[in-house]
Amino acid sequence: MLVTKSLVSGVKWTTFQSTFSAVIQVFRVFVLTKLLIANDFGLMALVLIVTGFSQLFVDFGISSAIIYKRNNTEGELSTLYWLNVALGCFACLILLFFSYPISIYVFNEIELNNILKIISITFLFNGFAIQYKALLSKKLMFKSLAKINIVTPLLGFVVTIILAYQGYGVYALVYGYMVENFSRGSLFILRGKQFHIPKWYFKINEVKSYLNFGGYQMSERIITYFRQQGDNLLIGAFLSTEILGFYNLAKILVMKPVQLIRSVFNKMAFPVYSSIQNDDQLKKMALTINKVVYLAIIPVMLLLIVFPETTIYYFYGEKWLSSAPYLRLTAILFSIRLLRTTFGPLLLARGKAKQSFYFNLWFSIIVLVALCVTLQFSIIYALYALISIELFILQAMNLYIVLKPIFGFTINDYLKVATESFLPLLFACLLSFSLSYFYSDFTNVLLSLGIYILGLFVGLGLFYWLNKNTVGFVKEKIKALKS
């Protein structure tokens, strides 16, 4: 009951925080598309690829190791803290040194050199803050984390918009990112120091178990990061920052609601799963989270898959309609991907960092090879390839590497879960697409809205009919907490 109570409280605060952050981000993009050009968004996408990769080394998987290990001694935490600080300094120096060759020889964008030099200082600071975020997560302090993640995007949003209006171009995005990063880290430190204040203590031999766990985690995250950013990386290298800008704006429209809905649970899933020792209870919790996530994503994905032109036209403007084909296919890809990503934290929660690493290794190799081949033709070909891989290869990997070893799932079990989650969205999309094909066009917003509402009503009704047991379980838990 304590775990369920923490989860429900976390859902409430994390939902509010994620919703607020997503709204700020979406409104930010809405405004910035009127002030910036596609090349600015493409450059910032390249910056985030480089900085995101560097940030992985600052953490080194230590945060997950701290959360996973039940008891952390003062000496262990102090040693790990100073190790994170040293890694932050190292990442800062490496980025300063390699910013020019990365900019010229990888992306052929000289302006990227100056941006990377400016933004490198964030890694120096992050080394001092990263452990406190892990401690707040370990203590299930979702309320504090939510408040921090509400204030900091707002600060970054205000700075970005002001600078964009003043004509700073891509640097408005850069300085807004830095303000958000520094303010978030500062608040993590202020809130988290109640749990630990580091001493002048450093003995690497005492934290070997953390480093072994963290080493697999860092390796997995590096591989995962290159896979997740592989499309942006290869588009920036093979094509142009302008094309990357169009593609990335479409990806943002998909990723923000997906991150909003998925992060509500996934931010809590690892610490909550780790605290559940009973396998039956864990299975029921994991399946329930999977269903609830899919229920929440149906309205968004129905809109993006069936009405991409309408969404782009009314949100970004007519000059961005080139993003519409990317939007539809990316939404289809992530709708399928959600079938397995909600189960991702299970391997780590059961201490299977090695298996999680190898899963992501093969996953990433398959995806990156497919991207390298298909991007030679077009982004559209690449997205079709990723959808096929996700549907026929990665879902099978999820069954045999994650769900079968942990829960004893069979193919029939997995097909049942997939059908109960995905079928309502698929049916709603087919119905809405058929009606819009014959009776609507992307500029007729009222007719499109009517078709959307009809499809949504049918999809949600089918979901309820297929998942009565899950709905009943959630109602029972909420009722028990109220009593």
Image (tube, helix red, strand yellow):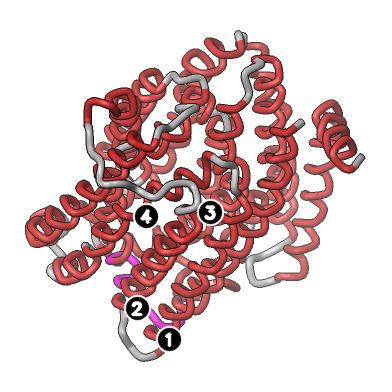
Q: Residue at x 24, y 66 (%)?
A: 119
Does residue 174 lie above or below 268 as drawn?
below
Q: Would you say residue 309 is visible in this rendering?
A: no
> Marks 3/2: CA distance?
23 Å
Residue 31 position, x and y percent, is 50, 79
Mark 4 residue type: Ala
Q: Which residue is mark 1?
A: 162
Q: Is mark 1 in CB contact (under 8 Å) with mark 4?
A: no
Q: Amino acid at mark 2?
A: Ala
Q: CA distance from mark 3 to mark 1?
A: 26 Å
Which mark is first along the chain, 1 or 3?
Answer: 1
Where residue 172 is drawn, which disc sits there? 2
State if disc 1 and disc 2 touch (CB < 8 Å).
yes
Task: State the image quarter where residue 442 is shown.
Answer: bottom right
Q: Residue at x 59, y 48 (%)?
A: 141
**Compared with residue 215, is residue 28 higher up or lower down, i.e. above or below?**
below
Residue at which label 3 appears: 254
Q: Which residues are magenta?
A: 34-43
> Residue 6 location, x and y as percent?
69, 40
Frontmost of labels 2 and 4 is: 4
